[in-house]
Image (spheres, rainbow, N blue to C red):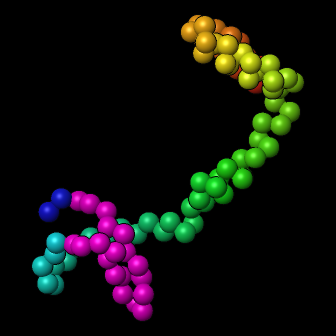
Amino acid sequence: MATRSVRARYRNGVLEPLEAVDLSEDQEVLLTLDDEQGQPTDRESFVQAAGGWVGQFDDYQALIRDIYQARMDGTGRRQELSLRMLWR
């Protein structure tokens, strides 16, 4: 049998698969647990990152303009120059 991941719920001391599994009665399997509750959601990650760029560059409007201009002219040169501003 190929290795695959199956979501399950732990209830009353028993792991209950949340999708069909093709196993014979009393077949043993190797179980690896991945506790997703400890992982932040996309929204939580976004909120935690908020403000991370504060103070990194002086003129964010110029950065935005340069990025869009680089996309329009296809050179990417202005984008590279603007991004260097972030790590002065």
Q: Residue furthest bottom?
A: 12
Residue 63 vertical position relative to residue 20 in the rendered view, above or below: above
Q: Is residue 88 magenta?
A: no
Q: 60 or 38, which is in the foreground?
A: 60
Q: Residue furthest front?
A: 72
Residue 45 in percent (x, y) is at 65, 53
Q: Which residues are magenta?
A: 3-21
Q: Is residue 88 visible?
A: no
Question: Count of labels shown?
Answer: 0
Residue 59 in percent (x, y) is at 85, 23
Would you say 40 lies left or right of 50 here? left
Residue 74 vertical position relative to residue 4 in the rendered view, above or below: above
Quadrant of the snapshot with the C terminus: top right
Q: Is residue 14 magenta?
A: yes
Would you say 54 lies left or right of 14 here? right
Dividing the picture into quadrants, the one containing residue 77 is top right
Residue 31 vertical position relative to residue 51 in the rendered view, above or below: below
Residue found 36% across the figure and 82% down from its top:
15
Dividing the picture into quadrants, the one containing residue 40 is bottom right
Dividing the picture into quadrants, the one containing residue 63 is top right
Residue found 80% across the figure and 19% down from its top:
62
Residue 32 in percent (x, y) is at 36, 68
Q: Is residue 14 visible?
A: yes
Residue found 77% across the figure and 41% down from its top:
52
Quadrant of the snapshot with the N terminus: bottom left
Would you say 14 lies left or right of 57 here? left
Q: 77 or 88, which is in the foreground?
A: 77
Residue 32 vertical position relative to residue 80 in the rendered view, above or below: below
Residue 13 in percent (x, y) is at 40, 90
Residue found 67% across the figure and 50% down from its top:
46
Would you say 52 lies left or right of 33 here? right
